[in-house]
């Protein structure tokens, strides 16, 4: 049994319309979810599939970090998909700095996030004091580097160039695997 603390405003997303998201996670993972919407806790009780339970835990964490439940569903089927959460409060000491960092990661009109998602193939969520990614290990590593570049003050142009270069490398590695 695992206890997760989830922001209260994300509990409804885990439950879903008429309980459908919760039910779907339970069915796919063979786990049971006990949700306490009063205090934001989710208890995950392992069923007969331990890996499924781990996938359910990661999926719930992802929804808790602001991802639309639909974007997290592939995590229940693919053992290699990971959730990475970067706590931005380690880099920002004031609310103004936090807002600036989140703005740099999102980009004007969402441009930076969109470029990163399209080139690297990850899903990105900026929620509260965190930026989170769902992707494969190599994609997560690239995104961590790109976000660190932005946090450290790199201009967006070099970050886009880095992402384009990594996109080509990922495509080449994909072609080479055939």
Image (cartoon, rainbow, N blue to C red):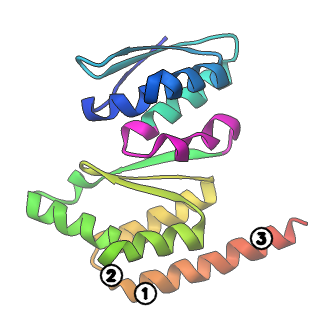
For label 1, the residue is 158
Q: Callout 3: 10 Å neighbours few (<14), some, many (20+)?
A: few
Mark 1 element type:
helix
Q: Residue at point 33% right, 68% down?
A: 105
Of residues 69 and 52, the one nearer the viewer is 69
Residue 169 location in percent, x, y?
69, 76
**Dot 1, crowdedness within 10 Å: few (<14), some or many (≥20)?**
few
Q: Where in the figure is residue 138, as x and y percent of width and height?
A: 62, 60
Instruction: Give the left or right position of residue 144, taking residue 12 as reference.
Output: right
Q: Which residue is mark 2?
A: 154
Q: Secondary structure at mark 3?
A: helix
In primary-sequence order, the first of circles 2 and 3 is 2
Question: Which segment is the magenta one?
Answer: 62-80
Q: Does 36 sit above or below residue 147?
A: above
Location of residue 97 in the rendering, given as x and y in whole percent from the top left corner? 14, 65
Q: The C terminus appears in which quarter of the rendering?
A: bottom right
- The residue nearer to you, when weighing 63 against 139, is 63
- Spot the residue most to the right: 178
Q: Residues within 10 Å of mark 2 (few under 14, many from 20)?
A: some
Relative to 94, does residue 44 appear above or below in the rendering?
above
């Amino acid at each position: 049994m695992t206890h997760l603390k989830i922001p209260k405003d994300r509990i409804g997303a885990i439950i879903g319309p008429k309980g459908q998201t919760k039910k779907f996670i339970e069915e796919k993972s063979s786990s049971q979810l006990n949700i306490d919407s009063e205090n934001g806790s989710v208890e995950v009780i392992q069923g007969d599939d331990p890996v499924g339970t781990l996938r359910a835990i990661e999926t719930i964490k992802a929804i808790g970090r602001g991802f639309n439940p639909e974007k997290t569903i592939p995590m229940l089927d693919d053992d290699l998909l990971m959730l990475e959460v970067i706590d931005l409060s380690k880099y920002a000491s004031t609310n103004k700095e936090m807002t600036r960092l989140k703005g740099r990661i999102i980009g004007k009109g969402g441009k930076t996030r969109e470029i990163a998602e399209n080139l690297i193939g990850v899903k990105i969520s900026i929620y509260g004091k965190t930026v989170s990614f769902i992707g494969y290990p190599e994609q997560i590593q690239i995104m961590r580097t790109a976000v660190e570049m932005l946090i450290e003050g790199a201009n967006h142009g070099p970050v886009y160039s880095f992402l384009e270069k990594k996109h080509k490398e990922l495509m080449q590695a994909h072609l080479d695997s055939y």
